[in-house]
Each structure stands twice: as structure tokens, then as C-alpha cells.
């Protein structure tokens, strides 16, 4: 039997989907990492100005 490291699950800030920080795409803003379920959500997040909450439930994302 082997011990598995605990997964760190967080929510994609665009669509709200749960993602594993160890394997998810990410971007950094103001020293904080944000994790994404897909490149579509990451690309939606990138041009969003700092301090503005991106619109959630991005169309065409996550099926």
C-alpha cells in the first residue's frame, strides 16, 4: 500500500468547476495563483482587469 499526497482542490474563477491545483492550468496575478479547468477559461481570465470579477459560467466551457 502506498500513501498518496492529498490533492488540493480549488474552483476555476471563470466557470466554478473544481480543479486539482497539481494538474490544472494556472495564471498568476498580484502574487496569487488562479487555477483553470481549460485554456478557454484561462484565456477568458487573462485580459480581465485587476479588481474586476470575470463573468462566471463562460459559454463554450466545460461542456
Image (spheres, grey):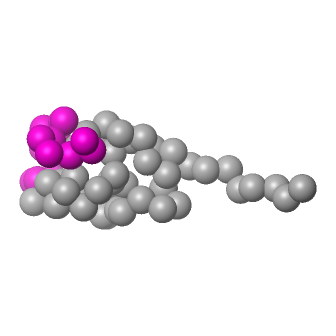
Tell me the quadrant of the picture where the N terminus can be found: bottom right
Q: In which quarter of the image is residue 24?
A: bottom left
Q: In this view, does 52 lie above or below 30?
A: above
Q: What stretch is highlighted in magenta?
A: 48-63
Relative horizontal placement of residue 1, taking residue 38 as reference (left or right): right
**Residue situated furthest right in the rendering:** 1
Q: In which quarter of the image is residue 27?
A: bottom left
Q: Where is residue 22 in the image (x, y as percent from the top left)?
A: 52, 61
Q: Is residue 37 visible?
A: yes
Question: How many numbered badges does the structure rendering display?
Answer: 0
| In magenta stretch: residue 31 | no
Q: Position of residue 57 (x, y in %)?
A: 19, 35
Residue drawn 14% across and 54% down? 44
Residue drawn 56% across and 49% down? 8
Question: Magenta region's main secondary structure?
Answer: loop
| In magenta stretch: residue 49 | yes
Q: Is residue 12 above or below residue 40?
A: above
Residue drawn 48% across and 62% down? 23
Relative horizontal placement of residue 59, taking residue 13 as reference (left or right): left
Q: Where is residue 36 in the image (x, y as percent from the top left)?
A: 33, 53
Q: Can residue 30 be seen in this view?
A: no
Q: Along the line of sight, which residue is nearer the eye, 7 or 47?
A: 7
Q: Position of residue 40 (x, y in %)?
A: 19, 57
Relative horizontal placement of residue 47, taking residue 4 as reference (left or right): left
Tell me the quadrant of the picture where the C terminus can be found: top left
Residue drawn 36% across and 63% down? 25
Amino acid at each position: 500500500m502506498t500513501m498518496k499526497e492529498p490533492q488540493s482542490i480549488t474552483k476555476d474563477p471563470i466557470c466554478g468547476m473544481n480543479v486539482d491545483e497539481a494538474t490544472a492550468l494556472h495564471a498568476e496575478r498580484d502574487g496569487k495563483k488562479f487555477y483553470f479547468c481549460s485554456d478557454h477559461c484561462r484565456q477568458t481570465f487573462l485580459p480581465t482587469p485587476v479588481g474586476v470579477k470575470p463573468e462566471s459560467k463562460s459559454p463554450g466551457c466545460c461542456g
